[in-house]
Amino acid sequence: MALKGINAYKKGNLKQEVAQADPHKLTLMLMQGALDRMAYAKGCIERKEFAEKGQHIGRCTAILINLRDTLDLTNNAEVADNLFALYDYMVQRLTDATVQNSVSIMDEVINLMLPIKTAWSQIPEAAKLEAYEAQRQKRQAAV
């Protein structure tokens, strides 16, 4: 019973964090969520909990597809194209991990995601503000 209360608190806390987060923070939260789900799936593979593994990999795949599909392919196209291809590759490897029940493939995808998340978390505040301003101006020009 106490676990239900803790989970409800976590869920409420997460909703509040999402509501207050800027786009940079939301992306960081998605990346961390993907890494968390990969770690859970890896543990499920090790414990032979295949139904739970599928749920975690499915959620992780959805996060990666969301990250891929929200890339701005018009701004800094080379970087965006490379990230798009990398997210696609990670989704494919997660499918392989599901089929093969492979911890080593899970490790591969985790090791691909970690540097992206680390780099994202180190973006300076000034660069974030500049990007938000550029986005705002782009939206205003479109109206």
Image: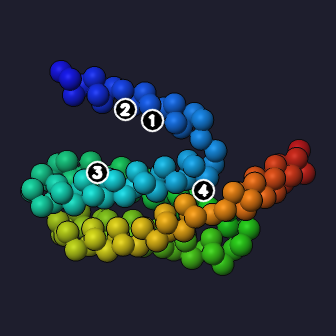
What is the x, y in percent for residue 125? 69, 57
Q: CA distance from mark 4 to mark 2?
A: 26 Å
Q: Earlier in the sequence, mark 1 or mark 3?
A: 1
Residue type, mark 4 in image: Thr
**Residue to which mark 4 is pinned:** 70
User: Residue at 22% across / 74% down in the picture?
Assistant: 104
Q: CA distance from mark 2 to mark 3?
A: 18 Å
Q: CA distance from mark 1 to mark 2?
A: 6 Å
- As drawn, the label of residue 41 is none
Q: Residues at badges 1 and 2 in contact (C-beta under 8 Å)?
A: yes
Location of residue 91 (image quadrant): bottom left
Residue type, mark 2 in image: Lys
User: Residue at 19% across / 70% down in the picture?
Assistant: 102
Characterize the local packing of mark 4: few (<14), some (14-19) or many (20 or more) Cα atoms within 10 angstroms: few
Residue type, mark 1 in image: Leu
Q: Is residue 36 above or below residue 108?
A: above
Q: CA distance from mark 4 to mark 1?
A: 21 Å
**Residue to which mark 3 is pinned:** 56
Number of callouts: 4
How has the structure been colored for display? Answer: rainbow
Characterize the local packing of mark 2: few (<14), some (14-19) or many (20 or more) Cα atoms within 10 angstroms: few
Nearer the observer: mark 2 or 3; the answer is 2
Q: What secondary structure is marked by label 1?
A: helix
**Residue to which mark 2 is pinned:** 10
- As drawn, the label of residue 14 is 1
